[in-house]
Amino acid sequence: MDKKTTSRDGTSLAYSVSGRGPVVILVSGAMSTGGTLAPLAERLADRVTAVVYDRRGRGGSGDTAPYAVDREVEDLAALLEAVGGDAALFGVSSGGALALEAAASGLPVTRTAVYEVPYADHLADGAAREAAYKRDLGQALAEGRRGDAVELFLRLTGLGEEMIERARQSPMWPGLEAAAPSLAHDDAVLGDGLLPRARLAAVSVPLLAVVGGASPEWMRRAGRDIADAVPGGAYRVLEGQTHMVEPEVLGPVLADFFAA
């Protein structure tokens, strides 16, 4: 990240800009930084100006306690001002929930697209699962058990115990533990884990909800629900894609939407 701006509460935010055309800010999900979305930014750069940034508490950005979702919305307000006053937003996973909240809050957002925001309405145990995760994550972080917090998140995503143990032994594990406190940020952004229909009705700009055709049915249905809840919302399925979507597949779809 080669640029800096400052949020309303004094938190320093690191970001980078590439490409040309309409400006789009890319919002990363849990356990990721702006760099995670750099390959997607590269795929967009010939048609849009892509802005990637480290959300507070990650990478080159600072953090200021206490955390609140409103502070992350203010972060996006600061970035919007820094890149010209208005821009489109794209958010992946829980970053999509943040992008939707920013659009609903009245920021100068021109368009919004999201990929697989994990609202759990269509999981039989969705509300209970979210409540248990919220409780256990809070306790693990309060007790300084960052590795356990990461395990909770990986388990929530469906990773098996053998794969989690391999992850613990991998060189990437210290970095995951370092980012563990930000898991509470993503959990807060997702609220109770259920689709905030009334809030989404306040989104007044064009919205594209994208999902992978090979992702679980509940996640695909969540994407359709988002599109239905936002006035003027649209829905798109990328056949063969999962939650770990390939930038070369997603990029052209987003470029068409944002450059329209």
Image (tube, rainbow, N blue to C red):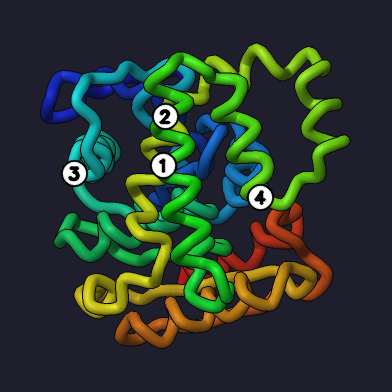
Circle 3 residue: 70
In the image, which is nearer the foreground, mark 4 or mark 2? 2
Q: Earlier in the sequence, mark 1 or mark 3?
A: 3
Q: Secondary structure at mark 2?
A: helix
Name the amino acid, label 2. Gln
Q: Are marks 4 and 3 in contact (CB under 8 Å)?
A: no
Task: State how far apart marks 3 and 2 are (Cα).
Answer: 23 Å
Task: State how far apart marks 4 and 3 are (Cα).
Answer: 26 Å
Name the amino acid, label 3. Asp
Instruction: Give the x, y percent position of residue 137.
Output: 47, 35
The reply to whether residue 21 is in sight is: no
Q: Which residue is at the front of the view, 25 or 49?
A: 25
Q: Earlier in the sequence, mark 3 or mark 2?
A: 3
Q: Is residue 136 above or below residue 158?
A: above
Which residue is pictured at 41% across the width and 42% down the height? 135
In the image, which is nearer the foreground, mark 4 or mark 3? 4
Task: State how far apart marks 2 and 1 are (Cα).
Answer: 6 Å
Quarter residue 39 falls in: top right
Circle 1 residue: 135
Name the amino acid, label 4. Thr
Circle 4 residue: 157
Q: Secondary structure at mark 1?
A: helix
Circle 2 residue: 139
Q: Earlier in the sequence, mark 4 or mark 2?
A: 2
